[in-house]
């Protein structure tokens, strides 16, 4: 099975088109996350989502269950990706109340920080979200200055362990680029790969050639 590709942090229609034409399976939109340089209002996101032919994923954080349900009803995405410190019981409460899949981002340490206690904590946290009903997990890097879109490579060793031990599709994110995506896929064997800053010319502005090359390389058969 070929690896799925998600191009995230899209803000412009021309970049959405490039992602679609390049074979991306999912387009990600950061919605109502003011601190993100890729942030969109829900109205801006809806304009893009209503036009696309690729499964849209809405990425958000820091919302209550009622706010999440309202956002999902307004945008009707394929999946809602929770990318903050949401607890697993919030995911359990959302099941059946939204008509889309629920994905949860799991914060991985940078590749240089893999303490045994941290590994066990992350594994248990991931299992809790799977048990709560998450349809997919996004294994992203949590750097000291942010979580998501940092361009920092996470621990592929830990990501590989999670992929093997969790009974749910896992996307690998964090520091992926056209130059390292083949190596990352070979090392982790994820269900999918998720890229944002690694295919940009500036925050929120994608480089079409980087998108094409990333998708082409990620879709190579292993």
Image (spheres, helix red, strand yellow):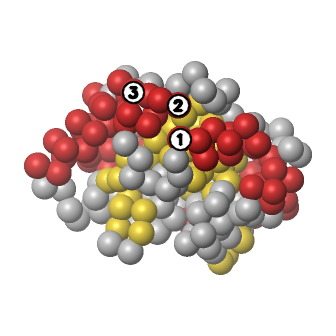
Seen as rendered, the residue at the extreme bottom is 202
- The answer to whether residue 222 is seen in the rendering is no
Residue bearing mark 1: 65
Pinpoint residue 133: horizontal percent, then vertical percent: 44, 25
Q: Residue at 53% of width from left, 31% of height from top?
A: 94
Q: Residue at 11% of width from left, 49% of height from top?
A: 117
Residue bearing mark 2: 94
Left or right position of 75 against 210: right
Pinpoint residue 129: horizontal percent, then vertical percent: 37, 33
Give residue 163's quadrant in the image: top left
Residue bearing mark 3: 132
Q: Residue at 81% of width from left, 50% of height from top?
A: 46
Q: Nearer the viewer, residue 175 or 145?
A: 145
Q: Tell me the tag on residue 151.
A: none
Residue 77 higher or lower than 105, as above or below? above
Image quarter (top left, top right, bottom left or bottom right) of the N terminus:
top right
Seen as rendered, the residue at the extreme front is 66
Classify mark 2: residues with Cα within 10 Å, few (<14), some (14-19) or many (20+).
Answer: some
């Amino acid at each position: 099975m070929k690896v799925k590709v998600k191009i995230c942090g899209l803000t412009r229609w021309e970049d959405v088109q490039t992602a679609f034409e390049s074979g991306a399976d999912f387009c990600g939109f950061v919605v109502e996350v003011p601190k993100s340089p890729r942030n969109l209002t829900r109205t801006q996101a809806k304009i893009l989502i209503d036009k696309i032919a690729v499964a849209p994923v809405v990425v958000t954080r820091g919302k209550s269950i009622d706010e999440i349900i309202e956002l999902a009803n307004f945008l009707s995405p394929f999946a809602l990706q929770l990318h903050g410190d949401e607890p697993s019981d919030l995911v359990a409460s959302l099941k059946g109340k939204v008509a889309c899949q629920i994905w949860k981002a799991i914060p991985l340490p940078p590749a240089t920080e893999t303490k045994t206690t941290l590994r066990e904590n992350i594994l248990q946290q991931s299992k809790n979200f799977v048990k709560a009903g998450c349809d997919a997990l996004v294994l992203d890097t949590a750097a000291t200055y942010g979580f998501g879109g940092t361009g920092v490579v996470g621990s592929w060793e830990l990501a590989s362990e999670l992929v093997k031990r969790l009974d749910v599709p896992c996307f690998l994110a964090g520091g992926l680029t056209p130059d390292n995506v083949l190596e990352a896929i070979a090392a982790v064997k994820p269900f999918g790969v998720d890229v944002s800053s690694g295919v940009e010319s500036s925050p929120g502005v994608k480089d079409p050639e980087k998108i094409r090359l990333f998708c082409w390389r990620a879709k190579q058969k292993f």
